[in-house]
Image (tube, rainbow, N blue to C red):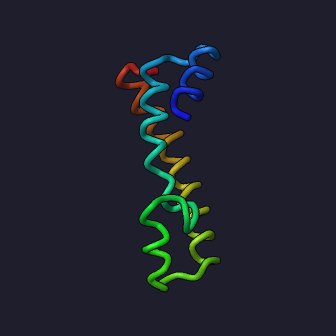
Amino acid sequence: MFAAFFAAGIALGAPPALLGLILAFSSSLMMSLTHYATGTAPIIFGSGYATLGEWWKTGFIMSVVNLLIWALIGGVWWKWLGYW
């Protein structure tokens, strides 16, 4: 999927270096989303410390927090570094 999204982003005019960083970094943020998002998530979920509803609710909240950090702080930081 990286190649497909990278090609689409380039076609839309996104800066290649910034697009590559965004796609690479965002691939590591998926574990909190669902109880089956990564290979380790089912093991952690299976331990019984959280219910399915708690996992999804917490995953949604963490996703919003992550997106806000990336959009606000990350955007300013990348602008300061000259990536964007």
Residue at (44% x, 37% y) in the render? 74
In this rendered view, identify the residue nearer to me: 32 or 83: 32
Q: Count how many numbered circles sit on residues in the image.
A: 0
Q: Measuring from the top left, give residue 81's x and y in whole percent.
A: 35, 24
In this rendered view, identify the residue nearer to me: 68 or 24: 24
Q: Is residue 17 above or below residue 33?
A: above
Q: Is residue 24 above or below residue 55?
A: above
In this rendered view, identify the residue nearer to me: 40 or 59: 40
Q: Measuring from the top left, give residue 11's x and y in whole percent.
A: 62, 14
Residue at (54% x, 59% y) in the render? 37
Quadrant in which residue 36 is drawn: bottom right
Residue at (48% x, 80% y) in the render? 46
Q: Is residue 32 above or below residue 11?
A: below
Q: Measuring from the top left, give residue 26's x and y in whole percent.
A: 48, 42
Residue at (62% x, 70% y) in the render? 57
Give the farthest residue toward the left.
81
Quadrant in which residue 40 is drawn: bottom left
Q: Is residue 33 above or below residue 49?
A: above
Quadrant including the N terminus: top right
Quadrant in which residue 8 is drawn: top right
Give the farthest residue toward the bottom.
48
Q: Measuring from the top left, give residue 60's x and y in whole percent.
A: 61, 62
